[in-house]
Image (tube, grey):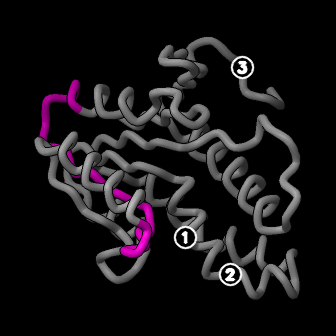
Amino acid sequence: MIVVVTGPVRSGKSARAAHIARGFGVPIIYVATARVDATDAEMVDRVARHRAERADMTTFELWNAGAPDLPAVVARASVGTTLLIDSVGTWVAGHLLDLERLAERDPLAAADALEERTLPFVESVGAIRANAVIVAEEAGWGLVPPSILGRLFRDALGRLVAKLARRADRFELVVAGYALDLKALGVPVGT
C-alpha cells in the first residue's frame, strides 16, 4: 500500500501520515529527510521534538547517514514493514541546495539535474515491497517565488508530487487538520 499525504505548512499532514503508518500494525521505519544545520538552534530543537513523537519508530536520518540516497532506502524496505518518509519537500530542497551554483548560471540545466536526482525515487516507490506513507508538501498554491531557487523548488516539487500521486493507492490532501482522499474523489487531469 502506498499513501501520499500532501498539504500546506502546519496542516496536520505529518500527524496524519503517522496515524496511517501506525494503522498498518507493522514496524515503522521513519525516514527523516531534512538536512539539519547544527548551528540552527530552532531546527535542532524541532528535530528533538519530532524524535520524541516517534519514539515507537525506527528512525533513519537520511542526510546524517552521509548521502541523500532515498531511492536506496526505499529499495531496501522489506515486506512486513512500513516506510514513513517525511518529507519529500525537504529532500528536494537538500538537492536543490547542492545545485545552487548551477541554478544561478543555468536554471534549465539545474532543473534537469534536479529531475535526474528525483526520478529514481519515483521509480523506487513503484517497486517498493513494504507499505509506504509519504509526506509531500504542497508548495504551488501561493505566489510565484521571486527567486530562481524558489521557482525551481516549487516546480520540481509539484512535478514530483504529481508522479507520486499516480503511483499511490491513496493520495490525501490535508488542510487545517482535515484529510480528503483525492484519488477516491477525483479524476486525474488528462483523462
Give the spatial CA distance, label 3 vs label 2: 35 Å
Image x and y of residue 98, in percent: 61, 81
Mark 3 or mark 1: whose residue is earlier in sequence: 1
Q: Residues within 10 Å of mark 3 (few under 14, many from 20)?
A: few
Quadrant of the image occupied by residue 167: top right
Secondary structure that dominates the magenta span: loop
Q: Amino acid at mark 1?
A: Gly
Name the mark nearer the viewer: 3 or 1: 1
The residue drawn where x is 46% and y is 31% is 13
Q: Amino acid at mark 2?
A: Leu
Mark 3 or mark 2: whose residue is earlier in sequence: 2
What number is the disc on residue 99?
Answer: 2
Give the spatial CA distance, label 3 vs label 1: 32 Å
For this view, does 126 lie left or right of residue 188?
Answer: left
> Looking at the image, which is closer to me, 131 or 38?
38
Mark 2 or mark 1: whose residue is earlier in sequence: 1
Name the mark nearer the viewer: 3 or 2: 2
Find out whether residue 34 is within the magenta segment. yes
Image x and y of residue 7, in percent: 58, 32
| Circle 2: element type | loop
- Tell me the residue that label 3 is attached to: 187
> Looking at the image, which is closer to me, 71 or 106?
106
Q: Is residue 164 above or below residue 22?
A: below
The residue drawn where x is 53% and y is 23% is 174
Find out whether residue 119 is within the magenta segment. no
| Circle 1: element type | helix
- Tell me the residue that label 1 is attached to: 94
Q: Is residue 86 above or below residue 95?
A: above
Q: Which residues are magenta?
A: 22-40
Q: Amino acid at mark 3?
A: Val
